[in-house]
Amino acid sequence: MRITTTVNGTEHEVDDVWAGESLLYVLRERMGLPGSKNACEQGECGSCTVYLDGEPVCACLVAAGQAIGREVTTVEGLATEGELHPVQEAFVEAGAVQCGFCTPGLLVAAHDLLERVPDPSDLEIREALAGNLCRCTGYEKILDAVRLAAARQARP
Amino acid sequence: MTTMDRLVGAGVDRIDGPAKVRGTAPYAYEQDPGEPIAHLAVVQSTVNRGRISRLDPSRAEALPGVLAVLTPANAPRLGKGLASDLPVLQSLDVHYQGQVVAAVVAETSEIAKAAVGAIAVGYDAEPPDVALSPDREDLYAPEKLMAGFATDSIIGDVDGALAAAVVSIDATYETPTQHHNPIEMHTSMARWDGDSLTLWDADQGPHNIVNDLVTGFGLDAGQVRVISPYVGGAFGSKAFTHPNQMLAAMAARVVGRTVVYELTRQQMFSLVGHRTPTIQRLRLGADPEGRLTAISHEVVEHTARIAEFAEQTATPTRVLYAAPHRRTTHRLARLDVPPPTIMRAPGETPGMFALESAMDELAVVLGLDPVELRIRNEPERDPERDLPWSTRNLVECLRTGAERFGWAGRDLRPGVRTEGRWLVGTGVASATYPTRRRKAQCRISVDGAGRYVVEIDGSDIGTGAWTALTQIAADALGTDMASVELRIGDSRLPFAGGAGGSTGLASWGTAIVFTARDLRKQLDEQHGGQPPAGGLSVDGELPGESPHAKTHSMHAYGAHFVEVRVDRDSGEVRVPRATSVYDAGTIVNAKTARSQLLGGFSMGVSMALHEGSVTDERYGHYVNHDLAEYHVATNADIGEIDISWLDVDDQLANPIGLKGIGEIGITGAAAAVANAYWHATRLRIRDLPITPDKYFRELGES
C-alpha cells in the first residue's frame, strides 16, 4: 500500500506499507520522525499523541491507511523555523521535562488544550492531560508549564 | 549552606530540555548504527516451572523476512558465571512465567512479532508456586540483604519489653508486587564489528552492563562499548543487565548485522524485574507518654528460584526512632516468579509504609498528636550502630511541614469531618533514606582557550544529572556552564557506577570536584594559573565511601503531610493537597531537584492508591500486565503538592554537602496517605493499594 500524507507541512510518500501498520510505526520507522514515542502500543499512555487533521490522536491506534490524504502534525512540527513554540519553551522553563519520553505526546496534548481553551483552569488542565502518563514529574510542573504558556499566549 | 559556589543551588533549566521538547534527543531505539537494523521479538514461557518438551521453529523460519529463530537448541553458548536470568536460551528448563524460550530476528518488528505467533511450544510443567504467606514452612533467612545490610538486628529483650509495655500495637501490613514501568520500554541495539560489540542501550549506567557482556560473550572489557546518553526513565529496572541486552548481542552475532530489541509494555512485567511483595508484622511498645520501649519489625518477602534478591525492607526501622529494645528480621520465600530487583528506594519504600503506619496507630492508642509522638522518639545517636549523625533534621522537617500545612489545632478524632459527600482527614509520616557515595573516576581536559571537557560515565535517566553535574563542574573549575562540555552515558568514559541508591551526584559530582581541584592545582603550580596553549588533561578518582561513613550515620530525612478525601458513597479517594519538607543537604539545582522530589512523592501516592501487580495463583501470571490495568497516577489523580527543603548541608558526606534526592520523596509517602485515610474514615487499610473496594470491605468488618 502506498501512503501519501502531509506531515508537519511536508508531503510524505511511502510505499509497501502493510495494512496492519500503525501511523506511529510509519512515522517512526518509515518517515524518519522518531519524536512521537512508542510506550504502550495500545493507547494508554499518550506518548505518541499527534494531530490528525487537527484532532489529537494516539498514533499507535490509527492505522497508517487512515492517514492517507490527511494532515499530521507531530512534536517535530510544533517549532516554527527553529524557534520553540511557547508550549515547548514553557515545558523547559517550568521543569516539566525529566526523562523526556512522555514529553512529545504531552506537548501535542497541551498545545491542543491551549488552542481550544486559551485560559484553562487547573481542573481543565488535569483532565485534558490525564491521558498522558508521566512517571517522573508527578505532573505538578506540567501544570505550571501549561499555566505559563497560557499566560504568555494571552499577552498582546 | 556552603558558599563555595555560584551555580550550585541555582534553578538552571535542564540543558537536555530543548532536544527533548523538539523530539530530537536520541533514545536507544533511535540511535543510528550506520547500517540497516534487524528486529528481535521473543517467545515467552506460559508456565512458571518445568521444561520445554516441544519447540518447533520451522513455520516461523519459513516466513519471508525472518532472518533467524534462536532457541535453546541452536543459540550460541554464553560464558559461565552469568547470574539470574542472563543465561538466555541456554537451557530447556523454565523458572518463571515470561522467561524467553525463543527469539525471532526479522527484517522488521512487525515480521518478527508475527513470526513469534507461528512458534509452537510445549512444556512438561508443574503447578506454579507463587503465593507468599508468613505461614510457609520454607521461609528462610538469607545470608545478607541487598547492599550488604545484615539480615536481622536484635538489641535487648524485645519480647520482654513488649509484654511489659503499658501501651502497644501489633499489626501486619502488606504491600503488593509493583512494577517500575518507566515510560520508555527497555531497549537494546547491538552491532558487532569483528569481535567488538557496541550496544546502544536504555540503562542506568553503561559500566553496570559491560561486565555481563564481557562474561557472556568471552570478551575483554575493551571490546565492549555501551552507550546510553538519553534514557526514558528507569526507577531501578534499568540498573542491571536483563535478558534484553544479552539477546540483542547474541542475535546480532548470529545474523551478522545490527539487531534492536525493544520490549513490549507487557514484557516489562516479566523480563526486567519488579518490587517484591511484602508482609510485615510491626509491634511497638511504649510508655504512657509515648516513649518507645520496644520496636519489632519482621518482614516476609519473596525471591526467585534462580536468583536471590533480599530486599532490605526493615532497615529504616534500624535508624528512625529511639527504643532500648529492638528487632528487625527478614525472611524469604523462593517462588516461581521472575527475579525481583531494586525499585525506587528498595527497602525503605515498603518498610516505611509499615513503620509509619504503625507509628500512627500507636499515636491513636496514646491519644497523642502523631507529629509529637515522632518528636518524642527522636534518637540522639543512631540507635543500632551507636554512632553520631552526620546531620539529622527530622524534627525540623516535621515542625516546618506542620506549619506550612496548617497542622496546628488538628482534631485527633477520625471520621468526623465532612464536606458534602467527602470524608476529610489529614495524616503525617516521616521519610528517610541513606546517604552514600561510590567509587568514580573522572577526566577533565582544558584547551588553550579555557574550554573544559568533563568526562565521566555518569547517567541521566531523567534526574537532571546532565545539568547538575555541569553546574558542579563549572563551580569546581571556577568557570561558567557554557565553558564546560560534559560527556556522560558511555562506557568508554572513565568508570562510574550507575544512577541508583541516590548516589549519582554524591559520587560523580565528588569525583568531578576532586579532579577539578587537581587540574587547578596543576594549572597554578606549573602553568601560572593559565591553561597552556597545548591544553592539559587530568585524571582523578573518588575512591568510594566518605572517610566519615564509618564514624557517622548518614541519612536524608523528610516529613509528609497529606489531606485525603474519601467519597462516602463510592469509596473514591482523592489527595487534594500535600506538603513535604526535606533535609536532603545541599540542593544542587533547585529546579531539577524539586521535580525529583515531586516525582518521588507522587509515585508514593500512586503506590498508596493505585499500584499493584495481581498474581493469578492458579496460572502464575500477572493478570494486569499493561498500563490499562496496572494503574499509575495520572495528572487528574494528583493534587497540589508543596515541596520545600531545609537550608542545610552535610560536609561529612561529600564536599558538595548533598545527601541525594532521587528516593527520599517516595519513602513514607504511602503511609502519610493511609494515615490520612484513617483520619478521614476511621478505617485502617493495612494492605496497599487503598482501592475503593477496600472501603466497603472495611465498612463490612467495622
Image (cartoon, coloured by chain):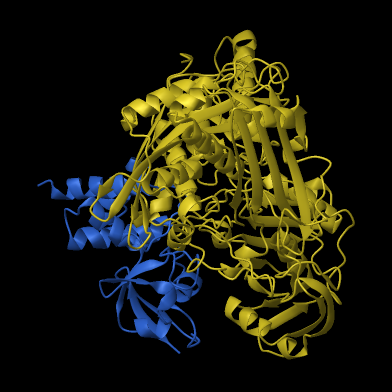
Location of residue B216 by image quarter = bottom right
* Residue B484 visible in the picture: no
Identity of the residue furthest to the right in this view: B80
In the figure, is residue B585 to the left or right of B120? left
Residue in the image at 59% along x and 71% along y: B623
Residue B231, x across and y down, in percent: 55, 51
In the figure, the shade used to draw chain B is: yellow
Residue B309: percent from left, percent from top: 75, 49
Q: Is residue B121 above or below residue B360?
A: below
- For the residue pair B325 and B330, the one nearer the viewer reads as B325
Whether residue B286 can be seen here: yes
Name the quarter where the N terminus of chain A is drawn: bottom left
B215 horizontally vs A155: left or right? right
In the displayed structure, B238 sits above or below A77; it is above
Residue A52 image position (x, y, % from top left): 31, 74
Chain assigned blue: A
Instruction: Give B313 or A82, whichever is nearer the viewer.
Output: B313
Find residue B638 and report its horizontal and vertical position in percent: 36, 50
Q: Which of B487 and A66 is in front in this view?
A: A66
* B256 over B403 or under it: above or below: below
A60 up-or-down from B359: above or below: below
Q: Identify which residue is drawn at 44% across, 68% down.
A: A44
Q: In which quarter of the image is residue B255?
A: bottom right
- Choose between B87 and B67: the one closer to the eye: B87
